[in-house]
Amino acid sequence: MHKDLWRGRLKDNKIDSKIKQYISSIEDDKRIIEIDIDVAESHCLMLYKQGYITKKEIKLILTGFENARKQWQEGKLKLDTENFNDIHPAIEKYIIDMTDIEVGGKIHSAKSRNDQVCADIRISARNDIIKIIDMVISFNETLIKISQSHIDTVMACYTHLQSAQTTSFAHYLLSYVDVLNRDIEKLFEIYSRINLNPLGAGALAGSSLKIDRYYTSKLLGFDGIIENTIDAVSNRDFMLELGCELGNIMVTLSRIAEDLIIWSTQEFNIVALDDKVADISTAMPQKKNPDPLELLRGKTSTVIGLVNQLFIIGKGLPTGYNRDLQETKISLWKIIDITVSSLDIIKTVFETLTINKERMKELVIRNYVLATDLVEYLILKKNISFRQANYLVGNIVRKMVSGLIYLKDITPDTIERISLESIGKKIILTKDEINKVFDPYESITRKTNIGSPSPEEVKRMISIRKQVLNNNNKKLTELKVRLKNSHKLLTSTINELIR
């Protein structure tokens, strides 16, 4: 019954089965069924408020929607997927069948699939943003907790993947805390642009029925409306912005994963993955493979490709809704799901990670990382220019490398001889001076400028980052409370009418 009411323009009332399957989004739309019900209920409550639906009719309609929700939660919801290729008319048909065409046929008044799906996607996206912010905050809490135990853990940092200078493991971790804090800031900003109501825009140009877009915004927890009705249904810039930011997060996680993969090799051996997060080789019994981290790198490429797909879909579309946009929500949801799972995995890896402090210190000593410390000591104490000092130390390192001698083992006589040969000046350092310059821990304590790895400076940064985390947690809690209150309003309004 009523199967032909959606195809009045077309002579053939039944779409070709191959075409229906090709254009169908029913399976993907299952992700937003309950959101779609919330949106449809809010719209109907608005129509009731504006006098287009009677009290008796709204009770029947809302009862139908709530039955659909209950059946969905119990896995019993049966929708007409034979005649409909997306969730919105399928649910509308369900309500019509539960009431009748005179009642259920009113629920789509002053509404289109176009504004409805935009509302659904925005609500789904804002919920996902809240979840991801929560996860990034939690990951940062883990990094800060670990950093507190490694303020004095000296390690070599790298440029061009070559040993560069000394830092601490805490200093390294805080560098990513700061990157991820910027991501949290951006996600809050994106949330503010996503949490706007497109409902009431209709197919494109609104409606001549007198509707109240601010009322549906209040019921659905939106912070405002997207004013221009063409803009409300045509543009997916909010999806591009969110996709790009999640791609940004994934690139950061991929870089961290790359570090851990390299550092967990036998050649580096400065970290060890817990057995629970590693995999094995089926052929080589000695192998302990960092598969989750490798897949995180691979999934980052997938996310970048999906973000590119969002841009490609949108770049050639004319103004107005076009069915191509159906593909954008699929791409965005994949991006979201990969980001969520990757944040979960990387946090688990760090929570179980073993740090080899002695090996970190050994690599600082063995790999001539302290050469720059000697350059700066010569500038400070021996009154020579940077370029002379740099050239001298470069010559010293070359001789030490060729003789397989560590910098800490260099003698005052050797420095005097090489300085005369290289810069024409006799530079005299005592053995005590040499020992102090080439002490790994002394190296980081000398770096006291803002943002440097000295223990006191790192402690200061940790304290500030903790406060940032607290502020972000408070801000996130406020968003959750606002959404909870709006949903409570929607639920109470429904219950009052159907009881």
Image (spheres, helix red, strand yellow):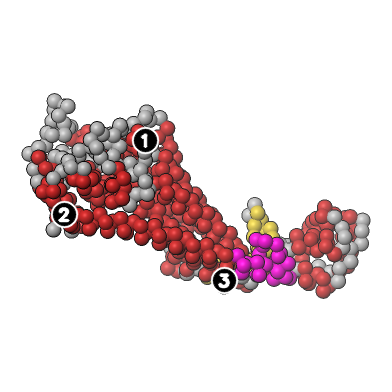
Q: Is the magenta stretch mostly helix, strand or loop?
A: helix
Sooner in the amino-acid sequence: mark 2 or mark 3: 3
Relative to 461, residue 204 above or below:
above
Q: Residue 497 carries which label?
A: 2
Q: Distance between the residues labelled 1 and 3?
A: 50 Å
**Residue 254 seen anywhere in this rendered image of the structure:** no
Task: Name the residue carrying label 1.
Answer: 228
Sooner in the amino-acid sequence: mark 2 or mark 1: 1
Residue shown at the point (30%, 55%) measured from the top left: 486
Q: Which structural element holds mark 3?
A: helix
Q: Quadrant of residue 70?
A: bottom left
Q: Nearer the viewer, residue 494 or 280?
A: 494
Q: What residue type is labelled 3?
A: Gln
- Residue 497, position in %: x, y? 16, 54
Q: In which quarter of the image is residue 214?
A: top left
Q: What stretch is highlighted in magenta?
A: 439-461
Relative to 287, residue 222 above or below:
above
Disc 2 vs disc 3: Cβ atoms closer than 8 Å?
A: no
Q: Which structural element holds mark 1?
A: loop
Rate crowding at label 1 as few (under 14), some (14 to 19) or many (20 or more) other CA atoms within 10 Å: few
Sooner in the amino-acid sequence: mark 1 or mark 3: 3
Q: Which amino acid does label 2 sit on?
A: Leu
Q: Which mark is residue 148?
A: 3
- Residue 383, position in %: x, y? 87, 60
- Residue 420, position in %: x, y? 91, 59
Residue shown at the point (54%, 55%) measured from the top left: 179
Residue shown at the point (44%, 40%) measured from the top left: 308
Q: What residue type is labelled 1?
A: Asn
Say if the magenta span includes residue 443. yes
Between disc 1 and disc 3, the foreground one is 1
